[in-house]
Image (cartoon, rainbow, N blue to C red):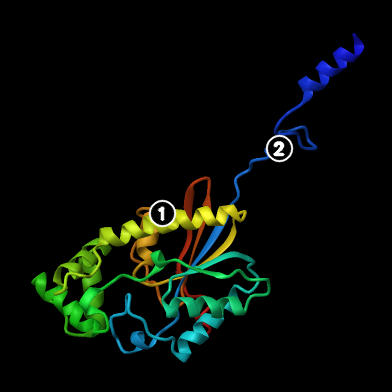
Amino acid sequence: MLPIAALLLTACGSNETGTDDSGGTASTNEAKETTIYLVRHGKTWFNTMNQVQGYSDSPLTEEGEEQAKLVGEGLKDVEFTSAYSSDLGRQRNTAKLILEQNQHDVPQIIENNGFREKNFGSFEGQSNDDMNLAVAKALDLDYPEGSDELWDFLKEQLTEEELANKVAEVDPTQTAETYDEMHQRVEKVMPEMIKEVEAKGGGNVLIVSSGGIIPIILESVAPGEYQGEKIANCSVTTLTYKDGKYTIDKIGDTTFVDQD
């Protein structure tokens, strides 16, 4: 009977999760945390010339390349398990320059067009002033004449959703994206990205996107957290993901590029 009793004691003492040295339960399925570094691309030629830049593209300026290198230097000790951009050259090249400064083995950049900037339709390549004036006139607003002042004025008058929809409404070709269309592609790309990252065991992720779409990404994963903070060229927005929930740590941080 003793061998049988011993077997019963052994069976009763077994535990699928196991125990740690202190006698507590140690889970074998502890959720892994993912940290996302969401970066806007460096300054481009279109940015410098005040031209509308969405699906259209233009190269990084020397300043934009230097911005990307500074971000890379600031993140050089971060070991990235995954890296993403869209097929837009300004995003892809910013990601490359950031990773070139890294002290670890770096992942291949995965291109996913869900991270593209907004599609501004027939306004692409035109002056930002022309697009902004078209929006202001359609709203019958008493608007300021200056370029930067007009943009800031519109941002004060309209939410991200209202502004995107008004641009789509006044686009003569009706090809500009609505807010819902942008939100839908973001809601698709983020779960795709997380699934791929978790398959690699989580870790740190670099995503290079654009100033117009980053606020929509934030609204998609953490509704109400984005409050209009400026998303400057090569600013870094940091998020963590765990147990199906995103937490925003920083929005539009320019510490790495503000060296003066």
Above or below 93: residue 104: above
**What is the x, y in percent for residue 6?**
87, 17
Q: Earlier in the sequence, mark 1 or mark 2?
A: 2
State the image quarter where residue 132 is shown. Answer: bottom left
| Residue that appears at 15% across and 67% down | 169
Looking at the picture, how far across and down is residue 151, in whole percent? Answer: 24, 77
Residue 213: image x %, image y %? 36, 67
Marks 1 and 2, how far apart in space? 30 Å
Residue at mark 2: 26
* Secondary-structure class at tag 1: helix
Badge 1, how many Cα within 10 Å: few under 14, some, many 20+? many
Q: Residue furthest left?
A: 140
Amino acid type for the residue under numbered disc 1: Val
- Residue 127 lies, in percent from the top left, at 24, 85
Identify which residue is drawn at 60% across, 68% down.
107
The N terminus: image quadrant: top right
Residue 3 image-quadrant placement: top right
Instruction: Say the numbered circle drawn on residue 221.
Output: 1
